[in-house]
Amino acid sequence: MSHLDNIPSTPGKYKPDKAFRFNSSAASSSLSKLTLYSTLFLSVLLIFLLLLYSPSSKPSLRRHLSTGSHRTPLSLSHKLIRKSARPRSTTGNTVLVTGAAGFVGTHVSLALKRRGDGVLGLDNFNHYYDPTLKRARQKILEKAWVFVVEGDINDKGLLEQLFDAVLFTHVMHLAAQAGVRYAMQNPGSYVHMSKSANLQPAIIWASSSSVYGLNSKVLFSEKDRTDQPASLYAATKKAGEEIAHTYNHIYGLSLTGLRFFTVYGPWGRLDMAYLFFTKDIMKGKTITVYESPDKGSVARDFTYIDDIVKGCLGALDTAKKSTGSGGKKRGPAQLRIFNLGNTSPVPVSTLVSILEKILKVKAKKKVVPLPRNGDVEFTHANITLAMMELGYKPATDLEAGLKKLVRWYLSFYSRSKKKSS
């Protein structure tokens, strides 16, 4: 069986046995620290945006492009780039996917390529989590004829070269530093950018459900206030949405933001609870399960990767063209924000119970209070807008999705152990 199943998941019937209480979290880290780090983030981003429009010499692609552990010659790079970015038909899209070797980026790139779009990937293969997993994803992409340029989205010279080499119709911007807690120690690593070209592509980018912060209203709607971030990660995602609004207004960029709700599935990040729970339960290690201050359940709107991919493609297919050219706006441009969730939050304790059932192993659990480091007690997406405008309809319940996840995990890591031995 393929590790990346291209057959849509079928709807299941799993529902939590009983309702559980939702309560808003207390404060996160101190306001002064949040203000300081958010100011640093915005300062670096604004400096970068100023550099984005300043004249500079264009460095050779030779020093930028690589695959795997070896550099790719200039002539070969051009050939691979153009082949990868060429759509199957004249009506197909040409898409630059940033963060292409990431969890969501890999699945989206493959889905675009399968349906005939031209796809070029960009990823810096950072070490936030084991890059071995990213390299394995890269191999899957290469087999599907998706070339991944190794480079940073903050490298202006590289981006200029790529936009000169390929006329992109869309940018699927999925590159960002993942993880809420990581941002507490590395706020500078969250800098990301918007791109303007002479023929501007429509841009779809990954925001996050974390922008809802301390919001206690259920369900989370795109119309709700998002000015109470509970983490630095949330603050930078919110800042990204505000900057997108500015670029839309000034430069006529067509921009669509997607607020992902706890994405899970095969090829997921190893720092996510569903994967390290799986690993530790199998090894007989004690897992930590968080509870709210009033001893209530911490819950997440877990959303299977296949459903997220459908939402991403729906956003791309309904995105209108940008109205700017060469940094000048020619008319009003599209600006949208959508929730992509499962709209069926499940307590983390139930997640653990399902994993116990699938793995046939009883978990050793330690229940502790939810730390005040940026995580919130619950998430619950209102997806009405995405359903109406994108045709988005999540079809995978948690138990069905976790079965696929565990199947991939056992297969992938058993092969990895054999190779290492």
Image: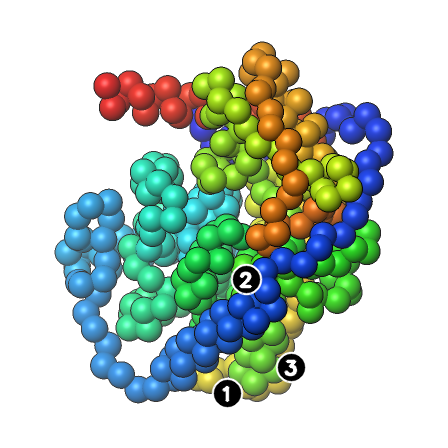
Whether residue 358 is visible here, answered yes or no, is no
The residue at 33%/73% (across/down) is 156
* Residue 232 spot, x, y in % from top left: 55, 62
Q: How far apart are marks 2 and 3 (CA)?
A: 32 Å
Position of residue 170 relative to residue 282, above or below, is: below
For label 1, the SS is strand
Q: How far apart are marks 1 and 2 (CA)?
A: 32 Å
* Residue 94 spot, x, y in % from top left: 44, 59
The residue at 66%/25% (across/down) is 399
Position of residue 233 relative to residue 262, above or below, is: below
Figure quadrant of residue 374: bottom right
Mark number for residue 35?
Answer: none
The residue at 47%/43% (across/down) is 103
**Residue matched to label 3:** 332
Residue 417 horizontal side relative to residue 399, left or right: left
**Residue matched to label 1:** 328
Is the C-beta separation of discs 1 and 3 under 8 Å?
Answer: no
Mark number for residue 232?
Answer: 2
Mark 3 nearby-residue class (10 Å; few <14, some 14–19, many ≥20) = some
Between 186 and 62, the one lying in front of the other is 186
- Return the disc, 2 or 3, that comes first in the chain's sequence: 2
- Return the disc, 1 or 2, that comes first in the chain's sequence: 2
Q: How far apart are marks 1 and 3 (CA)?
A: 12 Å
Figure quadrant of residue 337: bottom right
